[in-house]
Amino acid sequence: MGLMNKIMSKCMNKIKSMGMNMPNIAAEKAGKVRKEVLLVILVLLGFVSNLSAQSIPSYYGIENRLRKTSDNTPASNTIDRILIQGKNNIWLGTSRGLSRSTDNGSSWTNYYGSKDFGNESVSAVGEGLGAIWAATWHYIEDASGNPIPKGTGLRYTLDNGTTWKEIRQPVDTNADTITTYGNNKLRTLPIPVGEGNFIYDIAFTKNTIWIVSYYGGLRKSTDMGVTWQRVVLPPDNLDAIKPTDVLNFEFSSSAGKLGYQNNLNHRAFSIVAAGDDTLYVGTANGINKTTDANAQYPSWIKFNHTNQQKPVSGNFVLSLDRNEIDGTIWAGTWKAEGQTEYWGVSSSGNGGKTWETFLADEKVRDFGFRYYTNGVTDVFAAAESGLYRSSNNGMTWIAAPKIVDSESKVEVRATLFLSVECNVLNSNTTEIWIGTNDGLVKAIETPTSSWFEKWKVYFASSGTVTTSESFAFPNPFNPKTDLLRVKYNLANSSSVSLRVFDFGMNLVRTVLQNASRGANPEQVDYWDGKDDVGKIVPNGVYFYRLDVGDGTPLFGKILVMM
């Protein structure tokens, strides 16, 4: 309700200021002003009623409308995580919760709005211990009105999504001021809140689930999430620890108010298992490895940009993955605090002793692997700037071309590529699933096709529209982080004009002028939120006019909110 109150307060202040000046305004003009202000309030309330349930991240494109549980598309256009279970089940972690397809994308079950998931976003999905797991979170406002992420826990299912068990977000208690590691008692800073503790990643070893989070660090559970244990990693000033060491450091991910040591290595973001005993954990200070993960107190060695001859590119390790054929570890290693660090991909084929680095200056968020029967592997990297593929273990990379749906001709204009996974259906067909902030994509490869010749794009929007309808999304729209899409139905080839007006119906931008468009029931065109001189428009209510041939113009409303 904070955002609604702010908007209402601003509107009421505007009305009061107008009321004070009313004697100087002609009656007719004053009446017009009152109507316009009232209309602004009604319009804003119409939008805010949908916003108040969740403050959205700046890079998320969320459509504010109710959806069916089962649909032709996932419920969201922001696909953070992809999990392929077997050959037919596709699980998605998205900004609008969990989505699942059991028929390779022909239909989807969306859990957003269900009794088990509510209006939660999903930050991680995983398969292990006989279950499918999903980590949930949402945004809340801090004291200054800024959105901050809050982890709300985990859900898991033992019956393929029919029923779900909820686990509350694991957090410290105020009493967690001492942590035992071997013979050591380490002074610990407890952070007993969900804010900043949402789960980034999940991994599994024998009878154990492992989770990582910003303030919560690394945790494990051996009883399906009933109880959790904080796992000690080396502090920033040590490259290795073992339980027989005599140690004297503070176990803390923040300096806090009491002057604790601020250990970046206790802020965890990624994790991958390499068998039942070996784990790699990515933090803000490097990659931590243990080969005795199931011990009461695992020993750790840390690899980072400054402690090896051939190190990782950067210490902020946002993603980790493993090639199951040759065992190589792949990491999205971002620049943290060091002057010589840089964004890129880091890969190790010898268990982390040395690292090769690739794709300098690319911010990679996820990896996928396409395994061939002859033992060769293609590596895919989903980076913020695009999707890349290497057929020679990273020595060279090829960027994916423009993504256009092979049938509907809908074009993906993603500003972020977030996730990628490969599904080898048989010796003749492989599907590459790609998650972006502009929809889900399936690329279909066959022996007779070139790379990514056939695409299928899944857009979460209003579904099918008639020739007398149009739909704009995301709405509200942030021009700094997204593109506005205007979807409409073209029964026949035609010329199309698209113009944007402000609230006073003054022309702001001519987006299209008599542009040729072919017949397409799901035509999408874009507005970047800029006016005719290239400046981003200010917050407010806008309208678009869509002219298709000589037909009746179509109008729509847009709320720009940054």
Image (spheres, grey):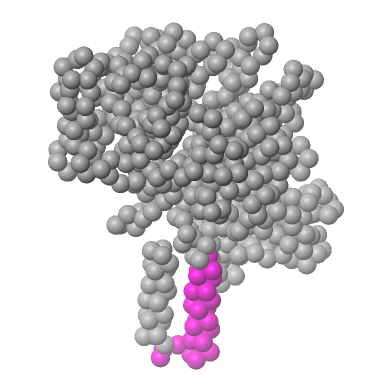
* Residue 234 in the figure: left or right of residue 283: left
Position in image of residue 271 (x %, y %): 43, 26
The residue positioned farthest toward the right in the image shown: 492
Image vertical order of residue 471 relative to residue 17, above or below = above
What secondary structure prevails in the magenta region? Answer: helix
Name which quarter of the figure residue 257 lies in: top left
Image: 30 above or below 89: below
Q: Quadrant of residue 293?
A: top left
As for residue 520 lying within the magenta part, the answer is no
The x and y percentages for residue 194 are 34, 46
Q: Is residue 236 visible?
A: no
Residue 246: image x %, image y %? 16, 17
Quadrant where the C terminus sits is bottom left
Location of the N terminus by quadrant is bottom left
Query: Residue drawn at (51%, 36%), measured in percent from left and top?
Result: 133
Q: Per the image, is 30 magenta?
A: yes
Regarding residue 90, the answer to whether it shows in the image is yes
- In x, y percent, where is residue 535? 50, 53
Magenta-colored span = 23-47
Image: 41 above or below 526? below
**Which residue occupies the foreground of this view, 277 or 20?**
277
Residue at 32%, 54% (x, y): give it.
Answer: 142
Up-down relation of residue 251 to residue 537 (above or below) = above
Q: Residue at x 61, y 55 (%)?
A: 473
Residue at 45% from the left image edge and 22% from the top image edge? 205
Residue placed most toward the observer, 540 or 181: 181
Q: Is residue 406 left or right of residue 49?
A: right
| Number of numbered markers | 0
Q: Along the line of sight, which residue is nearer the eye, 129 or 136?
A: 129
- Front-most of residues 346 and 257: 257
